[in-house]
Image: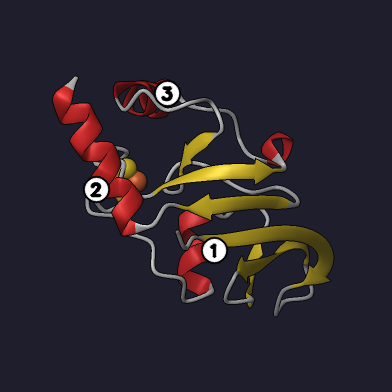
Amino acid sequence: MGAILFQVSRDGGADAEGTRVSWCEVTFLPAGKVARVRAGSRLLDAAEQGQVKLRHVCGGQANCTTCRVQVQSGTEHLTPLSDKESHRLSDLRLETRWRLACQARVHGAVTVRIPTLIEQLEEARENESR
Ligand code: FES
């Protein structure tokens, strides 16, 4: 079953005004697309920057969970789970490695997996039968 992975790494740089900023390099796998976003950007911003298709039906309000991603590595480089995000993910009975891309912000190297539409449909079917 296909999946999209992306990795974030951090380096230094400066913005147009010469202010020192930290950038996160985002690499999407298996497509290998790379995007650079400022440290503190949301995973959803990184996906958009890298032109990776990631559903976000509620527009980033932590209501729909369609933007969920599974963290493969670098959990320590993501902002902590908010109460709302934690509640939404527990509603889906997802393990702790899952995050909402509209809520989690990156501050270092991170690799996440975006579930395929088929995985999402199978998960929805399982949740309905519970
Ligand atoms: S976009 Fe809806 S929960 Fe993230």
Position above or below: 80 against 123: above
Total numbered circles: 3
Position above or below: 31 against 78: below
Within 10 Å of disc 2 (Cα), the crowding (few <14, some 14-19, many 20+) is: few
Q: Nearer the viewer, residue 84 or 128?
A: 128
Mark before the other along the chain sequence, 3 or 2: 3
**Residue linked to disc 2:** 121
Q: Secondary structure at mark 1?
A: helix
Query: Type of residue at label 2?
Result: Leu
Position above or below: 109 against 103: below
- Determine contact: label 2, label 1, CB under 8 Å: no
Q: Image quarter for residue 17? A: bottom right
Q: Is residue 13 left or right of residue 125?
A: right
**Residue linked to disc 1:** 46
Label 3, label 2: how many angstroms apart (C-alpha)? Answer: 21 Å
Label 1, label 3: how many angstroms apart (C-alpha)? Answer: 21 Å
What numbered label is drawn on residue 86? Answer: 3
Mark before the other along the chain sequence, 2 or 1: 1
User: Looking at the image, is mark 2 or mark 1 nearer the viewer?
Assistant: 2
Residue 65 placed where, x, y %? 31, 41
* Residue in view at x 66 percent, y 69 percent: 27
* Residue in view at x 38 percent, y 62 percent: 54
* Residue in view at x 61 percent, y 68 percent: 29
What numbered label is drawn on residue 23? Answer: none
Query: Type of residue at label 1?
Result: Ala
Q: Nearer the viewer, residue 78 or 121?
A: 121
Q: Secondary structure at mark 2?
A: helix
Query: Type of residue at label 3?
Result: Ser
Residue 70 placed where, x, y %? 52, 43
* Residue in view at x 24 percent, y 41 percent: 64
Q: Is residue 52 visible?
A: yes
Label 2, label 1: how many angstroms apart (C-alpha)? Answer: 24 Å
